[in-house]
Image: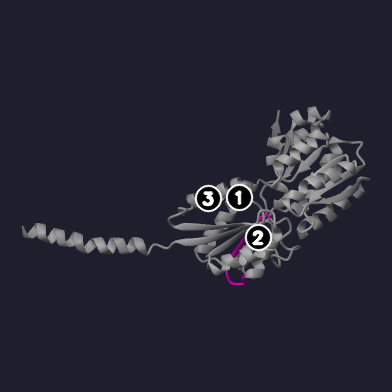
Amino acid sequence: MQLATFTLALVLLAAPLTSEAQQTERVYRIGWLSVGSPSGAVDARRAFSEALLQLGYKEGRTLLVEDRFAEGRSDRLRDFAAELVRLKVDVLVSHGTPAGLAAKQATTSIPIVAVGSGDPVGSGLVSSLGRPGGNVTGVSAAYRDIVAKCVELLKDVVPGMSRIGFLGNADNVVNKAHFTHAQAAAGTLGLAMEYFSATKPDEVGRALAAMSRARVQGVIVTADVVITSRQGEIVEFVARVRLPAVYFVDDYVDMGGLMSYGPNRRELFRHAAVYVDKILKGAKPADLPVEQPMKVALAVNLKTARALGLTIPPSVLLRADHVVE
C-alpha cells in the first residue's frame, strides 16, 4: 500500500512538470510577404513547408506562418510589412523584389530571407552576394544572367524574327534592369525589343493586347509575381495569336507554353527554408551569403511548337532538361 501511494505521488508530481515542459516549447513565428496571391503561391508555400518539416518544424505546433498577400497591389506591401513587424515575427520571408524591399524598409532588426529576386545587389536588397550586410540575406533567382539566353532561344527557334516583346511589371525595379539586359542582347542579334508592362493583375490582358497590336514576333515573360498571377490567361492568349514565348518559370511549359529557361522555383523556396532554420538557430543574415541557383533548367513543349508551325533545332533540344511531347 505504501509503495502504491509512493508511486501515485510520483505520477502526480511528474504530471505538472511534463505539462509545463510542453507549454514552454518554443513556437516560432514566420512572416510571409508576397505581392502575389495565395493561389499563385501554392507550389512555393508547399515546397517551403515540406522543407521545414524535414528540418523538424511542424506548422501549427512549433512554427506558425503569418501570410500576407498583396494580390498584385504593390502599394499594399508597405502596410503588410509593417503589420508583420508589429507581430514580432522571428523571420520575415519575402517573395520577389518588391516584397523584399518593402520588408527591408519596415525593419532593420528582424532577419529577412528574400526569395526570388533577380538582382539582389542591383535592387539594393543587399550590399553584396558574398557579404550581404544588415538584416537581409536570401536565395536569388539570378534572372539578370538568364534574360540574354532567353533572347537567344527565341532567335534560335524563330530565325527570321526581328521584333520581340518583353512582358514585365514597370513597378518592379529589377524587371526594368532585366529589360535593359534583354534589349542589349537583342541588339547584338539585330533585334528590336519593346517593353509591355502590367503593374496589377487586371492590367495583364491590356498589356497582351498591346503586344499583339505591336506585331511582335516573340515574347519574353518575366517571373514577376503580378505577371505569374495570370499564367493561364497569358498561355491562352499567346496560343490564340500564335506568338512564340519563352518564360522564366517552368510552370508555363506544363500549361502549354513553348519554352522556359530559369531556376526551379520550388527549389528556391526549399533553400529558403534552410536559411530560415539557420537563422532560428542563431545565424545572422549578414553572415549568410545570398545563394544563387545551382541549376538553370530549359524546358520545351514540342506539342506547342508543332501547333505554332515551329521546328525546335536539335541544338536546343539537346540542352533541354524537360521536354513535353
Does 113 appear in magenta?
yes
**309 versus 257 height, above or below:** above
Image quarter for residue 199? bottom right
Judge left or right: residue 294 versus residue 258. left
Estimate how packed mark 3 is, as few (under 14), some (14 to 19) or many (20 or more) residues with alpha carbons within 10 Å: some
User: What numbered label is drawn on residue 38?
Assistant: 1
Query: Which residue is the site of mark 3?
Result: 49
Query: Which residue is the site of mark 2?
Result: 290
Q: Image point 74% across, 58% down: which residue? A: 119
Amino acid type, mark 2:
Val
Q: Describe the element under mark 1 as helix, strand or loop.
A: loop
Amino acid type, mark 1:
Pro
Specify whether residue 130 is in view.
no
The residue nearer to you, when weighing 308 against 146, is 308
**From mark 1 to mark 2, how far is it between C-alphas?**
26 Å
Q: Image point 87% across, 51% down: which residue? A: 183
User: What numbered label is drawn on residue 318?
Assistant: none
Q: Which range of residues does the magenta coloring cover?
A: 107-116
Q: Position of residue 54 (x, y in %)?
A: 48, 49
Q: Describe the element under mark 3 as helix, strand or loop.
A: helix
The residue nearer to you, when weighing 227 against 52, is 227
CB atoms at circles 1 and 2 under 8 Å apart? no
